Each structure stands twice: as C-alpha cells, then as structure tokens.
C-alpha cells in the first residue's frame, strides 16, 4: 500500500502560516472510494490520520506529522430540489473551497451562504469548525452530510443533529469520522435579490481585506470565551471577545517571537514572515496566553488546530 501514498511530503506550502514539517505519508483523494481507501490504509498501518483542508486554521509542528495526511480534493457541486419550492439543496465535496461554493450558489440564484464570503477554507474544514461570521453559523444551512468512519472506512449519511454543532465545534472534533461531502439548504431568490446578495458578498470581502491580515495567518488564533467563562461585563453583557483582552495587554502590532508577530490589524491574529518556524508561532501564542492570564485570570484557548505536537506547546 506504501506505493500508493506519497512519502515525506512538505506540508508548509499547504498551510496559511507556511510553516511546519512534512507528512510521513500523504494522499489527495479525488472521490469517495479513494478517500475510504486512504482511511483503510491508515487503519492497516496503525498510523494516525489527519485530514487537511486549505490549511487556513492549522499549525503543523516543525517535526511534521508522523502518520498519513489526507487532503481531500473532491470538489464536485450538485443541485437538487429542496423540500419546498422556496429552497434548493446543494451538495459539495469536502475539498470544495467555500468561496467557490458561495459563488456557484449565487450564480444559480441561491442565497444564504454569502455571509461567509472571504473566509478561506474548504467545505471539510468549514463544517469541522462550524465557520461563523458575526451571528451567521454554517450549521444553520447544513441539512445532511456523508462521513467516513475512521475505524472502518465505511460511509454513513448523517443529519444536522448528528454533528452536535456549537460555537467553533462539531462532532468531527472527536476525529472518529471525516467529512466526505455536505448538503446545504438554500433559498431560491429572484435575480434582483441575488444581485443584492452579490453586493453583500463583495462588501464583506472588501471589509475583511481592510480589517484582517490576508496572508500567513490562521485568522483568529484563539476562540472567543464562552459567557460562563468570563466574569467581566459591559452594559450587562459578558465581554467574550478574546481580542478585547489581548488588546488591553498591548500585544497588537507589538509582540513578536522570531519570525512570528501579532498583527497590527488584529490583536488575535498572528502573522508569520519568511523563515518562520511553527515553534515561533507556538511560543508567541503561549506568551499571549500568559499575558492575558496574568492580567485577567483568563486563559485563551486556541481555535487554531495544533497538529503533530507531541505535547501541547500552549498553556
Ligand atoms: C485570514 C483568515 C480569516 C479567517 N476568518 C474566519 C472567520 O471569519 N470565521 C471563521 O469561522 N473562521 C475564520 N478563519 C479560519 C478558517 O478559515 C476556518 O477554520 C476554515 O474553515 C478552515 O478550513 P480549512 O479547509 O483551511 O481547514 P484546515 O485548516 O486545513 O483544517 C482545520 C481543521 O479542520 C479539519 N478538517 C478539514 N477537512 C476536514 C474533513 N474533510 N473532515 C474532517 N475534518 C476536516 C482538520 O483536520 C483540522 O482539524 C479564518 C482564517 C484565515 C486565514
């Protein structure tokens, strides 16, 4: 089976941070059978398996990943009638770029997903984290999906409830199943309303380009706090935005370790520069945690997925 898997494949160019070591084994399945085959190969070798999307939310250890990295490339998009005349169901492979799916939907007068415009990532990574933009959550649109079981490589069709979606989470975090494809229920709109949605897409992308770094970052490194994790309030509302606390300790545009720095645009975003190592990012993130802990007694938890680290380098 070894001969079907590429070996010692550099992962840094496949991540947004552009850091990290190689994958011992690597596969890019383009269909369901090849995906299941890669899962079975991991099982047969007793090797750990990691599914990589666009690498927009991962930090891969400088030692790489001593197992099989599977990067799904199934990116087919299909339409079928919805359960009523106002909706259509869209199925997209796990390897579809989220923006491609949004653009495809708008080209077919299907609206709803445009709020996620400009968020990098594949459908697989987006369902995994339940991508969000202000109040919008991807889980509000997902009606069903096909998942591959880690143990057996068998395919199961599951519904929205199965995922136990929450803020920044889904059942995929258990890593017992991988997303093969997902089906979303979207509104059929008139040409005029779709033109409005296209405008919204363009405006969101413009806004994001101004507000966030656009390369060598994973977006927000830490997730926001949950209301019951924080004692601090303003106007009777809990202050859950982790960027608020990071701003208060003065890291924005100031703190750096090696070739990793806190963005000058956003206190919760780390950016790397040429020559950076994942160890730089991890040490910087840990320092950010320490500063917030010492000032507020709160420990920010990563949204970014750390991969291949023997022990967590964070608090
Ligand atoms: C500039 C920038 C801005 C961002 N803004 C936002 C934002 O506004 N909102 C937001 O929610 N996120 C944001 N993010 C984070 C990121 O875009 C999302 O987490 C995205 O969904 C990651 O997708 P990916 O394909 O790159 O996943 P990866 O980073 O490759 O992987 C992330 C996780 O998903 C898992 N995964 C990937 N594919 C599968 C699969 N098929 N089955 C099971 N698990 C899978 C991986 O194993 C890993 O644990 C931003 C990131 C960047 C770089």
Image: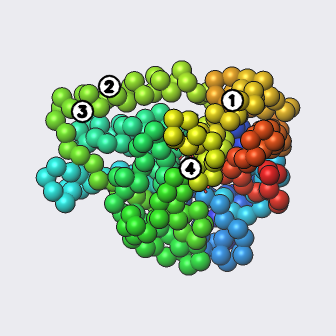
Please tell me whether mark 3 or mark 4 is closer to you in this view.
4
- How many other residues sit within 10 Å of disc 2, few (<14), some (14-19) or many (≥20)? few
Labels 4 & 2 near each other (Cβ < 8 A): no
Tell me, for residue 227, which label it has, or none: 4
Q: Quadrant of residue 175?
A: bottom right
Q: Residue 247: which disc? A: 1
Give the spatial CA distance, label 3 vs label 4: 36 Å
Name which of mark 2 and mark 1 comes first in the sequence. Answer: 2
220 horizontally vs 48: left or right: left
Q: Earlier in the sequence, mark 1 or mark 3?
A: 3
Contact? badges 2 and 1 (CB < 8 Å):
no
Q: Residue at x 51, y 35 (%)?
A: 235
> Which of the numbered marks, if any, corresponds to residue 277?
none
Asked whether the residues under the numbered discs 3 and 4 touch, taking CB atoms below 8 Å apart as contact, a structural biologist would say: no
Numbered mark located on residue 199 in the image:
2
Res 311 → quadrant: bottom right
State if disc 4 and disc 1 touch (CB < 8 Å). no
């Amino acid at each position: 089976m070894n001969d079907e898997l590429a070996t010692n494949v550099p992962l840094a160019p496949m991540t947004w941070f552009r850091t990290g070591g190689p994958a011992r084994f690597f596969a890019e399945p383009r269909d369901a059978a090849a995906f299941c085959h890669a899962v079975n190969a991991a099982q047969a070798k007793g090797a750990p398996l990691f599914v990589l999307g666009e690498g927009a939310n991962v930090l891969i250890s400088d030692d790489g990943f001593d197992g099989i990295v599977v990067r799904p490339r199934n990116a087919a998009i299909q339409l079928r009638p919805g359960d009523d005349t106002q909706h259509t169901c869209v199925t997209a492979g796990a390897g579809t770029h989220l923006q491609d799916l949004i653009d495809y939907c708008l080209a077919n007068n299907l609206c709803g997903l445009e709020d996620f415009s400009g968020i990098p990532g594949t459908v697989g990574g987006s369902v995994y984290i339940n991508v969000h933009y202000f109040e919008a959550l991807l889980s509000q649109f997902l009606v069903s999906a096909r998942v591959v079981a880690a143990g057996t490589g068998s395919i199961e069709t599951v519904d929205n409830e199965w995922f136990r979606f929450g803020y920044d989470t889904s059942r995929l975090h258990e890593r017992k199943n991988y997303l093969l494809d997902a089906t979303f229920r979207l509104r059929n709109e008139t040409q005029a309303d779709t033109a409005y949605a296209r405008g919204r897409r363009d405006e969101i992308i413009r806004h994001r380009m101004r507000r966030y770094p656009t390369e060598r970052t994973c977006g927000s490194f830490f997730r926001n706090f949950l209301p019951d994790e924080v004692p601090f309030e303003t106007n009777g509302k809990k202050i859950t935005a982790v960027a608020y606390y990071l701003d208060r300790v003065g890291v924005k545009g100031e703190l750096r370790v090696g070739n990793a720095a806190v963005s000058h645009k956003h206190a919760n975003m780390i950016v790397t520069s040429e020559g950076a190592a994942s160890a730089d990012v991890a040490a910087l993130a840990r320092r950010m945690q320490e500063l917030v802990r010492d000032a507020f007694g709160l420990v920010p938890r990563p949204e970014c997925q750390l991969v291949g680290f023997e022990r967590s380098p964070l608090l």
